[in-house]
Image (cartoon, rainbow, N blue to C red):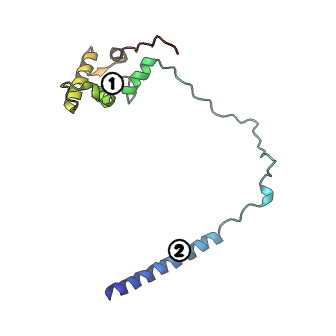
Amino acid sequence: MNRIVLGALAALCFAGIGMFWWQGRAEVEKSAPPPPTVADTPGEDELPIADVSGLQGPEPPEASELTREQHRFFRYDRNRDWRITRNEMLSTRADAFRKLDVDGNNLLTFEEWAVTTSNRFLAADANGDGELTPQEFATTAPKPKKKPACRC
């Protein structure tokens, strides 16, 4: 019995809330501006007219010319400070994860990956300051792929 009374009370509350909401929407629409008249809009064949004399847009941005090595460098240098930290180098090495399987069990642990990548980073860091300069990073470039002899 309590459920029936509670359900009826909830239904009355929802109906009352709905009525107030519906009346509030009607009040908002009464104060809305009238729709534009047909004479204000241009016809199908007419183009809108605007006076653009003396107006000038902003200059387009200049594209910077980056070399292939700079593009590769910036894939690792996420904050663009011209230095690659150890964390930046490790964060982008996920694609080469499968190549780093040291024990050959077709499972790569994080330790295997981190040790190999850390060793590569240390080998590239010539001055041992914990950061790679663009010159140091250039030593990590992959070997160029051989072009096929056939140009079919």
Residue corresponding to mark 2: 21
Residue corresponding to mark 1: 84
Image coordinates of residue 106 in percent, x first then y, are 23, 30
- Between marks 2 and 1, how big is the CA–CA gap? 58 Å
Q: Which quadrant is home to the N terminus?
A: bottom left
Q: Are marks 2 and 1 in contact (CB under 8 Å)?
A: no
Tag count in the figure?
2
What residue is drawn where x is 23% and y is 26%? 101
Asked if residue 85 is positioned above or below residue 41 in the image, the reply reads above
Image coordinates of residue 130 in percent, x first then y, are 26, 22
What residue is drawn where x is 78% and y is 56%? 40
Where residue 9 sits, quadrant-wise, is bottom left
Q: Identify the secondary structure beneath mark 2.
A: helix
| Residue sitting farthest toward the bottom | 1
The one of 43 and 20 positioned closer to us in this rendering:
43
Of the residues under marks 2 and 1, which one precedes in the sequence? 2
Asked if residue 128 is positioned above or below residue 1 in the image, the reply reads above
The one of 55 and 122 positioned closer to us in this rendering:
122
Left or right of 56: which side holds 76? Answer: left
Other-residue count near label 1 (Cα within 10 Å), few / some / many at <14 / 14–19 / ≥20: many
Q: Which amino acid does label 2 sit on?
A: Trp
Q: What residue type is labelled 1?
A: Ile
Left or right of 47: which side holds 59? Answer: left
| Residue sitting farthest toward the top | 149
Which disc, if any, is residue 73?
none
